[in-house]
Amino acid sequence: MKADVKYKLLQHLNQKKQQQGFTLIELLVVIIIIGILAAIALPSFLNQANKAKQTEAKQTLSAMNKGQQAYYLENNSFVEIAAGNVEQVSKLGIGVKAVTVNYTYSATAAKERVDNYGKSEAKALKEYVGSVAVIQVGGAGSGGEATSTSGLCETKNPGEEATQPNIDTAKGVINCNTGSMQDAK
């Protein structure tokens, strides 16, 4: 009996050595699972790069809004900026570039408002507009003090052109939610 047990033990150990490794089907299943996970995660990772580029526009336009408010306080007017004009942007004293790899910046000024635009250089990026408006405290024609309000709007979809937002002077609010625009998040 002892010899029979030894024989079976040796036979079992020999078969175990021959069965080491993975079968082709097991490898294919693992590769398919990894492929499915990559297909799910990849679009999310690619979108993060665009969000980072769009953050540049949000930061720059926020700085331009603040610069326009300060300029208005000192000069009683806003700065009109032609697309990419470095000299005009430098009047704001905020140290931002008028043209970057991702965006070109400009501003259209009127007596009581200015709209700072961030036009995207790539169709995959959203466009932005930052607006500053002068509001009379107590309503228009009240002769009261003036204050300013600002806001930042973005297009709902990449590749759309940013449009001028509405300004509710009675409430002192910039309304971005018009057509293809929404509040920047």
Image (cartoon, helix red, strand yellow):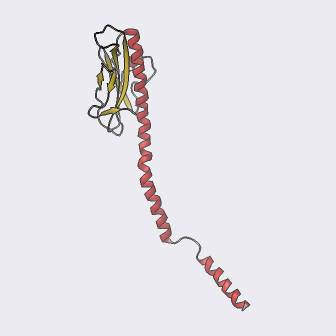
Question: If the image is split into quadrants, where does the N terminus sit?
Answer: bottom right
Farthest residue to the bottom: give it. 1
In front of the other: 90 or 139: 139
Farthest residue to the left: give it. 179
Q: Quadrant of residue 105?
A: top left
Q: Where does the image place residue 107, in percent across and percent down from the top left?
A: 33, 21
Farthest residue to the front: give it. 138
Describe residue 55's horizontal placement relative to residue 3 as left or right. left
In front of the other: 175 or 24: 175
Q: Is residue 177 visible?
A: yes
What's the residue at 39%, 24% (across, down)?
98
Describe residue 45's horizontal placement relative to residue 16 as left or right. left
Q: Is residue 91 visible?
A: no
Question: If the image is split into quadrants, where does the C terminus sit?
Answer: top left
Q: Quadrant of residue 52?
A: top left
Instruction: Look at the picture and state if 183 lies above or below 68.
Output: below
Q: Where does the image place residue 144, in percent across and percent down from the top left?
A: 34, 8
In front of the other: 92 or 179: 179
In front of the other: 3 or 168: 168
Farthest residue to the right: give it. 2
Q: Where does the image place residue 180, in percent across and percent down from the top left?
A: 28, 35
Instruction: Look at the picture and state if 55 lies above or below 108.
Output: below
Q: Where does the image place residue 132, in percent across and percent down from the top left?
A: 35, 20
Instruction: Look at the picture and state if 162 lies above or below 3.
Output: above
Q: Quadrant of residue 89?
A: top left
